[in-house]
Each structure stands twice: as C-alpha cells, then as structure tokens.
Amino acid sequence: MEIETIDIARVLESDGALFAETKTHAAGPEGALPITAEMLLTQPSGNLFGLTQNAGMGWEPQRLLDPEFLILSTHGGMRAADGTPIALGFHTGHWEVGLLVAEAARELRGMRAVPFAGACTDPCDGRTQGTAGMLDSLAYRNDAAMVLRRLMRSLPTRKGVIGVATCDKGLPAMMMALASSGALPSILVPGGVTLLPENGEDAGKVQTIGARFAQEQISLQYAAEMGCRACATPGGGCQFLGTAATAQVVAEALGLSLPHAALGPSGQPIWLDVAARSARAMLRMMQMGMGTRDVLTDAAVRNAMVVHAAFGGSTNLLLHVPAVAHAAGLRRPVAAEWAAVNREVPRLVDALPNGPGNFATVQVFLAGGVPEVMLHLRRAGLLDCSVKTVTGETLGANLDWWEGSERRTVLKERLRALDGVGADQVIMSPDGARAKGMTATVCFPAGNLAPEGSVIKSTSIDASLIDENGVYRHVGPARVFITEAVAIDAIKHGAVGHGDVVVLICGGPKGAGMQEIYQITSALKNLPFCKHVAVLTDARFSGVSTGACLGHISPEALAGGPIGKVLEGDVIEIMVDRRALHGTVNLVGEGQESFSAAEGARRLALRASRADLKEHPDMQDDTRLWAALVQASGGVWGGCVYDASAIASQLARGERVG
C-alpha cells in the first residue's frame, strides 16, 4: 500500500493542549550527593558533575559512590515491551542484545555496582550482499572499534567494561575495543544464534533464492515462503558457522568470554543467564585485581587460532584475530603461523557449511560448544591450559569444571531428545573426525597469480572433486569480471560454464573496501553444474562460503598484482592438497598453448595491468581513506588495522620528501 498523502498542516501544526503543558522548572531529585570535602578539593570537576548527572537520571543518591561499570553493546532497533518492533534493526543479530545488557545491568545493580550502558550498532553483511553497502563493511569494523574505545575512555570512572555483541563486524570491533582495556577488566557476552526453522532453509542457503529462481530450480512461491521463515527466531547470529559464529567461538577461546558462552540460543533463559554470570565474573575480576592484559596474551591468541582450526571457522577471522592482538599490544600472527596451526590441528566440528552432516550452530552449542572441543584439544596436547580467563581461573581449571558439570551432561541429553543427534556426531574426537574423512581447514595457495598469497577454506571444496590423495586440481579458462554485479548476472543467466575459473578483481581494499562476495559463492554452491567452477578474487568471502574459492589474493589488482593482468581465456591451474595444506594458483596457458608456472610468471611480468581496472563506482572517500591507512599498517595479512606509529612514520617521511 502507498503512504497516504500528507499535507503541510500535518507537518507544521500541533495539538494546542501541548502548549499549555509546557514547563520551565522542575523540583529535581531529592536527597544529597554523598560527597566529602576531600572530594571537592581533589576530584576533577567531571567526576563531580558525573554524580550530578547520575542523580538526575534517577539513580539513588546514597548509592552514587558504588563502583561504576560500563556495558557496551551493538544493539540496534527499538522493541516494545512485548518484543514487537517499533523500529527495526539492521539484522537479527543485534535485535535482542539489549535484553542481555539489561540482564547484566540488573545483576550489577543487585550487587551494589552502578551500570552504565552505551551502544554502537552494526551493519549486516547479509543485507548488503551485492549492494554498495558492502563497500563499508570491513572498514566499519575499525570505525566501530574506535567509537567503542572512545566511549570506554569517556567514562573515566569505570572499573571495567562488559561488551555485548554478536555479528560479523560488530563483534570483532567489540573484541578490539575490549582488548585495549589493559589493567582494567573486560568481558565479552556473545549475542548467541538464531534457531533453525522447523520447516525451512537456514539463513545461508536462503540467500541463494534469487540465483536458484533464475535457473528455474525453485518456484516464486517456494522462494517467498522460505525467505519468510529462515530467521526462525527474532534474535541471534546466523545458524551456520560463518563469521559471526566463528567470532563468538574465538572470543571464548581467547578467554574473553565465560566457558560455554558462544553460540547460545538467543532469547532463551540459558542465553540470558550468561549475561548475569558475566556481570558476576566482572566483579570477581575487579576483586582479584585482574585486568584484560592478564587474559589476552600471545598464548591466548595461539589458543584461539587452534580452536578456530578445530571448528573449521570463517577465513574472515584471519583478518580479525590479528586485529585483536594488535589492539592488545601483542604480536600479530602471520599467514605462516596460521598455516602451521592448521597443519597440526584436526577439524573436530561438523557444522554448516563445512559438513559432512551440516549441523546448526545451536546444535553445536548443545553438543558442548567451545569447551567440549577444547577437552579434545587438551588431550591432544594442543592448548596452553595455563592461560588465565575472565573466570579468574586458568583455562585448565575451567575445563576441569566443564568435564564434570551438570550443564554438559544435560545439554547433550537435550540434543538427543530434541533432534535425535548424538553430541559425538557434532563434536568428534580426532580419531572420530579422521574416520569421517574430515580434514583441516585453511590453506594458503601461492603462485604466479598470488605471489603474496591467498586463502581457501579447503574443507569446503566438494568431496567428489578430491582425489584419493586428498588433492583438488582444476585447470580451466579464465572468465574475468571487474565487478560483482556483472559476475552474478553471468552466473544467473548461464554464461559461466562447467570448468570455468571466475576471476573477480578490483574487489580488494583499494578497489571496493575488500568486499565480501557471498552471493557469488552461494550461487555457485547451489547451482548444479557450478561445483566445477572455481573462483579467484582479491576480495573476501563470507564465512558460510563453500567451493573452490580462493580469496585475499595479494597483491590486489589495483595495487599492480598479477591477478589484474589476467585476460579472458587464459588457462589457470589450481592445486590444493587438503592433507598437507599446500596449494598453488598459476597462469599455465594462453589459448591453446600450455606452459610451466615459471613461464607463466615471466609472461605476466611482461604484461601491463588490464586497461579496464577501476575502483567500484560507488567507492566513497571514507573507504578510500580506510584502504590507505590499512595499507600503511601491514595490509590484509596484518589484519587491516590502523597502526598509528607506522602511519605517522610514513606521513613524516612524506613531509620530509615534500
């Protein structure tokens, strides 16, 4: 229906009764500030005025000197008391986190602390797929982390910070902000996950209804019904082990969240309980004199990398874990370390989209989640269990508790009763995982088209394409696209065929803010012939992407990378050894002529970059600035951070040259 016509009177005129009710004075709060003469003589005026404002907002004057804690969240939208929407959020992931904020705040207040709450909401990568909004996605993470850090510092009387976040960019930004807390305690409350529809598709598959309809695989009615019910509950991150879920897992693996906090079912009592217990943990950390720097260490970062590998998590965490380490003042892990961890650590979790059984994230939670995986890793000697966590105890002590806990036993029984699924079907021992044919997760192919490397989630390659030695090989002609829009149009209308190699360039930081191209990879997964199509890109992938998709190709096309010299019909060879986690990507032919990778490198060196390379037409100055700053700070493999010292040094050198 169209919005009714609004005349100018309805814009300018108000109910006359409003004028007669207007006041200029109010009585103000009763009572007195609990201040002393010493406070008046020694405290900054901001601290004293803060007490005045706290009383003005209705806090009991006699409790104004209780310790103050800040609760930051990514909450978005506005809900009525009964949960119905007044104004929608950008996504379900932040729609319910205000309930967690309230639960933590009530717990703090009940324990004689003063809670403050602030928010910096976040966008949705699912909503911006294929749109100009995606050009702001990764850049937003750094902006949000800065805003959150500024909010933290703007309450100088805080004794600690609780962060509540769920999804792809808001949660990494929150971790980056909390990581800067240093001597003060901080704790992360993950916002949990959406439940599965009783009869429908998950939120990853449903994003392909356009491509499947274009190929006449589904009807309009089916698309409409599945699209309506995929988000079966109003809150939580997506049901698959994408970037949102993986970031929750990593936060817990870092020790920043309570044991078994990640992947909780949004909106349910067990989910709210985490917020209340996190508030208690915050107070305990304060009592013990623990700070965030006692939790975030180089060993904690490596533990997070190990758990990431065991889960088979999103490759986007290769950008976010180094950023968290940088924010904590720690050494950033490099690609070689990720490769070494993934060679050593078996994948133990069977979850969407990696398979083979494709269990949902809430089922992973009921099967035991992060601590259950960590029990297996501890037995294998792959974790440093001496690290401290936000419980105030070591990781080892936390795992001892988990192993004998009622929570562990009852939730596993609940999974079997609800879904007929055994916990060991979802989270396996190393021997069980090997028996299922599960392989390690992340591989970093290099070659004459990616001299500085690339990344592929090798577990997501269709098993039928892997030979008896665990090796995937693909040789095919290049189909080159400068924009995602042209590429998806070609896929939807059958212009990409069996054996092709889609080369999507100008999607890196300089070209498009390192856009995420899930609509491409999801379409290829769900169209019948497309498992035989490979993708090369200098952009990045969604955590739910599957297939032979190589992203993060470096250098990017607009930085002079050889990927920007590929011509239509060039023959490209891809090899990924899923057991050894070794891979290559090379130009090996032109037309009917074949040659070696070395000869391909020689010919690429003689070629100029394509004349049609250009940044995305909707690229904005905000993202251009982001790209320049992250390039000066270590680039993609450095986590796309802002390294203030490196940036200042480069600016100073420029001034001297000028």
Image (cartoon, helix red, strand yellow):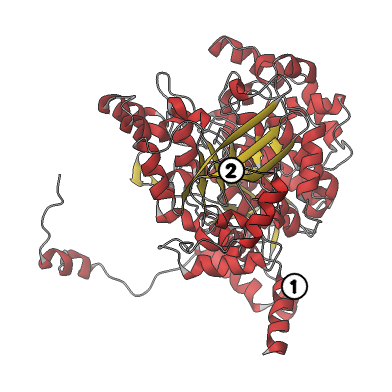
- SS of the residue at dot 1? helix
- Determine the residue positioned at 42% across, 35% down: 207
In the picture provided, is 399 more to the left or to the right than 465?
right
- SS of the residue at dot 2? strand
In the picture provided, is 453 more to the left or to the right than 340?
left
User: In terms of sequence position, does the residue under pointer 2 or pointer 1 come before the other?
Assistant: 2
| In this view, 610 is above or below 385 | below
- Determine the residue positioned at 63% across, 26% down: 365
| Residue 525, percent from left and from top | 49, 30
Residue linked to disc 1: 645
| Residue 71, percent from left and from top | 60, 52
| Residue 185, percent from left and from top | 75, 53
**How far apart are labels 2 and 1 at the CA level?**
49 Å
Residue linked to disc 2: 593
- 475 vs 633, nearest the viewer: 475
In the picture provided, is 71 more to the left or to the right than 92?
right
- The amino acid type of the residue labelled 1 equals Ser
Q: Tell me if I can see residue 178 in this picture.
A: no
- Determine the residue positioned at 80% across, 45% down: 337
Mark 2 Cα-neighbour bin, 10 Å: few <14, some 14–19, many ≥20: few
- 175 vs 570, nearest the viewer: 570
